Amino acid sequence: MFDALLFDLDGTLVDTESLALVTGIAAFASAGVSVDHAFMHALVGRDETTVAGMIRDSFPAADLAAIRAGWRAGFDAGVEAGLALKPGVTQLLAATEGLPRAVVTSTGRPGAHRKLAVSGLARHFRAVVTFDDVRQPKPAPEPYLLAASLLGLTPGRCLVFEDSETGAEAAWAAGCVVVQVPDVVPSAGRWAHHLAPDLLTGAQMAGLIGR
């Protein structure tokens, strides 16, 4: 049914969203800023530049540089300690070995490739589209349009796996078929063709693999 699979990275393939949440709250606290989970959840799926703007708008008196430095140090230490894969990743990649695959992420190029290397996933993907490769990141459709183009395919022939609203909106706008598997933030599936509790169930709902 599909000619390629496109995967978000954080919260979809690797379990980094919970790490980002914990280290982010700690970084804010170290800078004397108290944040709630609702604010942190609003940052999920956003690129670093957008996140910085949201922090600046919400906490104009905060030391943004200190927050970003503390958050980066804590997050990077967590990544280097090892990244767990999200449930079903290994099985789904094994079951779809013949299909071209790409990663489409809002992470910058160095961070994205580091996560893929640490998690052992790099060899499974023909292309990687990062924040540094586009002018308009998610929720704009450009990242997914670029990924389809790199694989030589039309977006409508690509099945996307995403966890966040931001990413699902980008894939939907690009004309892809979207499976959304929410991670730390619940979703009503506004931008999803299939809203699933896990990757394998989502793949089954989309007809990619048998039940």
Image: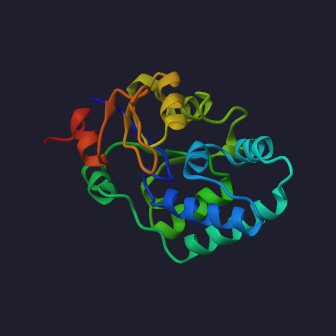
Is residue 108 in view from this perspective?
A: yes
- Image quadrant in which the C terminus is located: top left
x then y, percent, for residue 11: 46, 52
Say if 65 sits above or below 5 in the image.
below
Q: Nearer the viewer, residue 79 or 127?
A: 79
Give the camera-side residue of 124 and 105: 105
Give the residue at the far bottom of this rendering. Answer: 81
Q: x, y (%) of residue 117?
A: 53, 66
Say whether residue 187 is left or right of residue 44.
left
Instruction: From the top left corner, tell me how far across and down residue 150 is, in percent.
Output: 55, 36
Q: Residue furthest left?
A: 211
- In the depicted structure, whether residue 15 falls above or below residue 4: below
Along the line of sight, the residue nearer the viewer: 129 or 205: 205
Give the number of callouts: 0
- Which of the 4 quarters of the picture holds residue 146? top right
Task: Tell whether 158 sits left or right of 82.
Answer: left
- Can residue 105 be seen in this snapshot? no
Question: Relative to 202, does residue 114 appear above or below in the rendering?
Answer: below
Image quadrant where residue 160 sits: top left
Report which quarter residue 159 is drawn in. Answer: top left
State the residue at coordinates (34%, 26%). Answer: 193
Please name whichever residue, 105 or 120, is drawn nearer the observer in this view of the structure. Answer: 105
- Residue at (37, 43) in percent of width and height: 181
Residue at x-position 62% and y-position 28% = 140
Left/right placement of residue 175 relative to residue 199 reads right
Q: Residue 188: horizontal and vertical position, in percent?
A: 38, 31
**Rendered-image quadrant of the N terminus:** top left
Relative placement, left or right, of 108 versus 95 is: right
